[in-house]
Amino acid sequence: MSEELVVEGKRAPRPRDPTAAATVIPAERHAGEAKDVAALLATAPGVAVQEYGGLGQLATVSIRGSLASGVLVLLDGIPLQASGGAGGDLASIPRHWISRVEVLRGAEGAYYGSGALAGVVDVVTARPAAGGWRAELSGGSFATWSAGASGAAAAGPWSLFAAASADGTGGRFPYDFDPDPSAGAGGTRTEQRRHNAALRGGLLVKADRPAYGGQLDLLLQLSAGHRQLAGSPYHLTPLDWQDDGRLLLAARLEVPDLLPGLDGGARLHAQADQLDLRLDPALTARQRGAAAGGELTLSWAHAPGRLRGALAASGERLAGDALEGGHSRAALSAALSGELSLGRVRLAPAVRLDAVGPFRGLSAKVGASVALAPWLGLRLSGGRAFRAPSFAELYLRQGLIDPNPALQSEVSLSADAALVAEGAPGLLRLGGFGQRYQELILYQRASFDRLKAFNAGRAAVGGLEVEAASAPLRRLLSATFSASYTWLATRNLRGTGAEVGNDLPFRARHRLYLRAGVAPGPAELHAEVHVVGRQYRDLANTAVVPAATIWNAGGSVRLWQRPALRLHLEVKNLLDDRTASDPLGNPLPSRMVMVTLRAGSSPEGAP
């Protein structure tokens, strides 16, 4: 894990925010472990992943105590959030596509626009060299399986890459069920999770070629999935289900040296998504969304640094049964950012104006990094960001939930600092942060016991982040160690007398991730532990979610070197904790064993 974004491929695109609190998680580091985006993100500091039932079900991410809607989730730089959603669904991204996951913590609206209140997650898809290929097949507990294959080739000036992916699960696993938790008698019994299957498939196609002295990139992404929705153990929904799909097209042209020192770029994208949801035997709600946009950039390299400007325009539309027709809005933005090197000091100011339909917002950020020694640096930043309400919050009426067309934008203010030591032995990063969220959109009780969206939330968050990773220790069986720790203090600033000053719900004070591995010759062994501290279910802090500790372990052995062929064994929830549950009380999977066979043209360890 490196403070500066690690990039791969033919070109090394510059990170938008060069002084961000950033972590990069290469998927290859966990190859063969069946880790999806949610599992990869759970290894980073400052990040909390919520898996609503696991095994292909909805998964969202929170950064530094934010709501899921306060994190901008990108797929190859394009926002994943549908207009009707409150956050990107991590489980909708096929794991076989992933090259790396980039996590930026803090208010990043000045670089990424509306929605980046607490940070950004960018999932970068794979791009191997021409002639390369890979294939993978997995199977294991609870009728869970996955298959994926990819290959690249050259066709004249074009480099072509395609990847296909499919995975599924029966979703049936045992868990401990307490029929009367209020009694406190501990009278649990073993139940079987039913109506919990999931199936997903995807296709990814990339093409690039030299053009106009630069490079043209084309992208097509197609994914679709089906989920059974089991419901809470106390309110089972054996007839509910969800179908979803997404089509995304993008083109990017980057041309260096339009003029001496001046680089240019253009990007276009279009996407369509669909959601069919049955929450009642007689009712199926259909929702259709579409979005398209473009961006023009100019970057000028001058003696002490670089200046970058961008103009962007986009439009989105959402139509659905519960939306009383369709809704559309356009968005415009103008951004200016720079880098200034003054000896050992690098400054990175940025400002951005966004107009999203009727909502206007100013985002700004100033970052700085100071080289204290060749191996030691100090990084500081502060910023402001906003998020315009989604169509769902403004217009979606469903069940007992009412929208509110009078909503205003959410706002966040943040500051952080970190010491970063990095060299041949590895990386150690120690940081602290503070963040304030204003006008958060929450659903509260209105008339006739219905819930309605209001700008009712205000919160302060602070904490510490620690990140460490070692280089392989050759004399100790090529052992590696990595760790991340987050201490998070949250405070609710608005509500009733019994709620103000309390911890925010579902925000654990402590999160710890530890991993150790050895690679003696053709074999590899690893073990990891995730510790999540105690947290509360309500603003009054009366309902407690106990602390949880989950162990995972695994190993692999090389069967053949060229072409590379490797067999992996992975055990999740090694100690078989059957009491683990998500924030809504749905059980999470018990002990799970997966076996994976991977083959490819690349030597082991190559991207």
Image: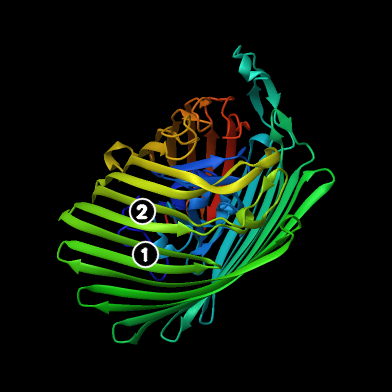
3D distance between C-alphas at marks 2 and 1: 10 Å
Residue in the image at 30% along x and 49% along y: 416
Residue occupying the far top of the picture: 185
Q: Quadrant of residue 405?
A: bottom right
Q: Is residue 102 visible?
A: no
The label on residue 129 is none
Q: Residue type at mark 1?
A: Pro
Q: Is residue 368 visible?
A: yes
Q: Residue type at mark 2?
A: Ala
Q: Quadrant of the C terminus?
A: bottom left
Secondary structure found at label 1 = loop
Q: Quadrant of residue 302?
A: bottom left
Secondary structure found at label 2 = strand
The label on residue 15 is 1
Query: In the image, is residue 215 above or below residue 431?
Result: below
Q: Residues within 10 Å of mark 2 (few under 14, many from 20)?
A: many
Q: Residues within 10 Å of mark 1 (few under 14, many from 20)?
A: few
Q: Are marks 2 and 1 in contact (CB under 8 Å)?
A: yes
Foreground pick, 361 / 487 = 361
The residue where tag 2 is placed is: 22
Colour scheme of the rendered structure: rainbow
Is residue 417 toward the left or the right of residue 17 in the image?
Answer: left
> Residue 239, how many percent across, how many down?
80, 40
> Mark 2 or mark 1, which has the lower sequence index?
1
> Residue 295, how many percent across, how many down?
48, 75
Residue in the image at 38% along x and 37% along y: 488
Query: In the image, is residue 498 above or below residue 52?
Result: above
> Residue 560, how many percent across, how many down?
50, 49
Query: In the image, is residue 291 above or below residue 448?
Result: below
